[in-house]
């Protein structure tokens, strides 16, 4: 699954266009490397997103095309 879509489906970022812009600005890292929106995300990958002064680091646990709001938290775990 594409990185920008995973960020949207997992609700780490609310909209896919915003996820795309964050990737283009270099604020998203996958396994310690700056990632473009088109990078394929796999189970076990570590994603780090920088929101201003705050940084969020998560591990991918599952990948699904769509999820309900309550199930979105099960797609990743905070590190």
Image (spheres, grey):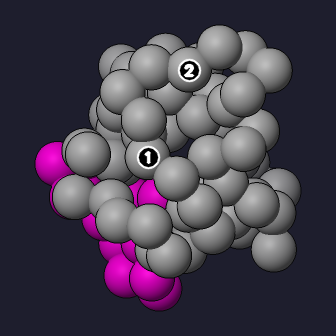
User: Which residue does the image show at 49% across and 38% down from the upper left?
Assistant: 7
Q: 66 and 6: which one is in front?
A: 66
**Left or right: 32, with 24 as reference point:** right
Quadrant placement of the C terminus: bottom right
Q: 6 and 34: which one is in front?
A: 6
Q: In the rendered image of this protein, does residue 10 appear above or below residue 77?
A: above
Q: Position of residue 8 (x, y in %)?
A: 49, 27
Q: Residue furthest left?
A: 38
User: Which residue does the image show at 63% across and 69% down from the upper left?
Assistant: 59
Q: Which residue is mark 1?
A: 63
Q: Is residue 62 visible?
A: yes
Q: Please identify the quarter of the rendering in which residue 67 is found.
A: top right
- Magenta segment: 24-39
Q: Is residue 54 magenta?
A: no
Q: Main secondary structure of the magenta part?
A: loop
**Left or right: 29, with 23 as reference point:** right
Q: In the rendered image of this protein, does residue 59 appear above or below residue 2?
A: below
Q: Characterize the local packing of mark 1: few (<14), some (14-19) or many (20 or more) Cα atoms within 10 angstroms.
A: some
User: Which residue does the image show at 59% across and 61% down from the upper left?
Assistant: 61
**Left or right: 12, with 15 as reference point:** right
Q: Is residue 48 visible?
A: no
Q: Position of residue 3 (x, y in %)?
A: 33, 48
Alpha carbons under labels 1 and 2: distance apart: 10 Å
Looking at the rendered structure, the secondary structure element under dot 1 is loop
Q: Which residue is mark 2?
A: 67
Q: Position of residue 39 (x, y in %)?
A: 21, 58
């Amino acid at each position: 699954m594409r990185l920008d879509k995973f960020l949207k489906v997992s609700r780490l970022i609310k909209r896919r266009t915003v996820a795309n812009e964050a990737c283009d600005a270099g604020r998203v890292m996958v396994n310690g490397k700056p990632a473009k929106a088109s990078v394929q995300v796999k189970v076990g990958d570590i994603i780090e997103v920088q929101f201003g002064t705050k940084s969020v680091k998560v591990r991918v646990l599952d990948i699904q095309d769509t999820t309900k709001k309550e199930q979105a938290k099960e797609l990743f775990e905070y590190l």
